[in-house]
Image: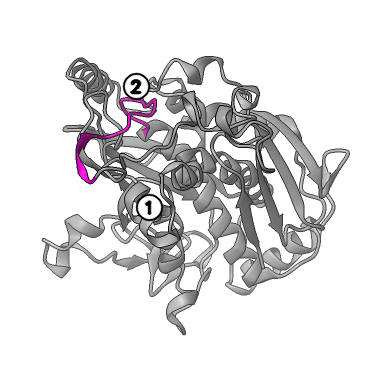
Amino acid sequence: MLRYLTAGESHGQALVAVLEGLPAGVPLTSKDVAAELARRRLGYGRGKRMRFEEDRVEVLGGLRHGRTLGSPLAVMVANSEWPKWTQVMSPDPAADPGAATAGRGAPLTRPRPGHADLTGMQKYGFGEARPVLERASARETAARVAVGTAAKKLLAELGIAVLSHVVRLGTAQTRSRAVPGAADLEEIDASPVRCLDGEAEGRMVAAVDAAKAAGDTLGGVFEVVAHGLPPGLGSYVQWDRKLSARLAAAVMSVQAIKGVEIGDGFANAAKPGSRVHDAIVPGPGGRPRRRTGRSGGIEGGMSTGEALRVRAAMKPLSTLVQALDTVDLSTGGKAAANVQRSDVTAVPAAAVVGEAVVALVLADALLEKTGGDSLEEVRRNLGAYLASLGTTQER
């Protein structure tokens, strides 16, 4: 029902994303997209460039006077540094081949450990890493945040809120078990590490400072939460229709994410079943509900109607100030890896990307369940479905 594609390279002229299947009538503006992209740029441990590089957004199609048209939504995110890269990244043969392969265009023959460089060169037959790293770069996630904004706006119109927060940076982690709600988002975004726990925030900031002083990088864990979902999104009938599988694939597709869990997934593996499964109890309006939320709002591959929680483990960034050992493929000898500019950590920003990809999956699953070519039709169909469950929800 809802699908998207992105195109573009990190230092290319622009990133482009096309989102197909979005109903007509969803309120959306280019300022909404720019605001989400601004959230993606910030976070303690990011480089100075993130404070002055502004993502210039242009909506190319699918939107008129602040409302979606039901046709494909096309968004372009321009590269503010494009003038520096016109020769190196020119789509046509360079007018001056020598200038295009000198300076910043010099061949990158020393692949960086932890990146796509070496394997990408082997797979596609490239003699240097530039063609690989340009597309493998996490800069691509700006395009996903752009179209994810539209998915979040659709969900918000139906009473569904998607937000994220950081629960761990390096060894510093929150001890709080509280699940944040939509009202907490402003406070989360105001935190330099996007953590709602003030005590943990201080330890996380100190961990970033220590890593920076050591010339190292930090990974961490973030959690995406969705409130207001109806029960029954996804399905148990086939592996690729399970909501949990779709969410895991989407979150794992974000650069540097190496692990995903739903609810208390990994912790639950060490507990007896009596302390894991969520007991079902009578709820308001006659609809049963779960007493606890250990399952993360998904059972049998379907949403339960409780708060959905997805956690992602992000590895430390692969580019270090102190370059790691590698091989220079032009000589076959040992060498220090190429050093591209890098941050100390990008976990707070990755959490915003997580919101976008989760929202895209949830919006797709919702449209799969309700159908509807317009926002009003989707709202009407959802209301009828909820009424059939013996209760209604305020939306």
Give the quadrant of residue 281: bottom left
Circle 2: element type: loop
Give the quadrant of residue 259: bottom left
Give percent across and percent down for residue 395. 65, 51
Please identify the dominant SS of the magenta region: loop
For image coordinates 51% across by 32% down, the residue present is: 101
- Between disc 1 and disc 2, the foreground one is 2
Which contiguous range is marked in magenta? 332-346
**Gap in Å between the C-alphas at discs 1 and 2?**
23 Å
Query: What is the quadrant of the N terminus in the image?
Result: bottom right
Give whichever of 228, 32 is nearer the camera. 32
Instruction: Please rate how many residues cluster around mark 1, counting C-alpha atoms within 10 Å: few if below 14, some from 14 to 19, many from 20.
Output: many
Q: Confirm whether residue 165 shows in the render.
A: yes
Q: Hey, what amino acid is under mark 1? A: Val
- Circle on res. 31: none
State whether residue 40 is above or below residue 123: above
- Residue 340 within the segment the image draws in magenta: yes
Q: Confirm whether residue 387 shows in the render.
A: no
According to the picture, the residue beneath numbered tag 2 turns out to be 45
Circle 1: element type: strand
Give percent across and percent down for residue 238. 46, 83
Task: Determine whether, in the image, residue 168 is placed left or right of residue 269.
Answer: right
According to the picture, the residue beneath numbered tag 1 turns out to be 310
Give percent across and percent down for residue 92. 69, 43
Way the structure is coloured: one colour
Residue furthest out toward the right? 65
Give whichever of 8, 220 is nearer the camera. 8
Q: Earlier in the sequence, mark 1 or mark 2?
A: 2
Instruction: Please rate how many residues cluster around mark 2, counting C-alpha atoms within 10 Å: few if below 14, some from 14 to 19, many from 20.
Output: many
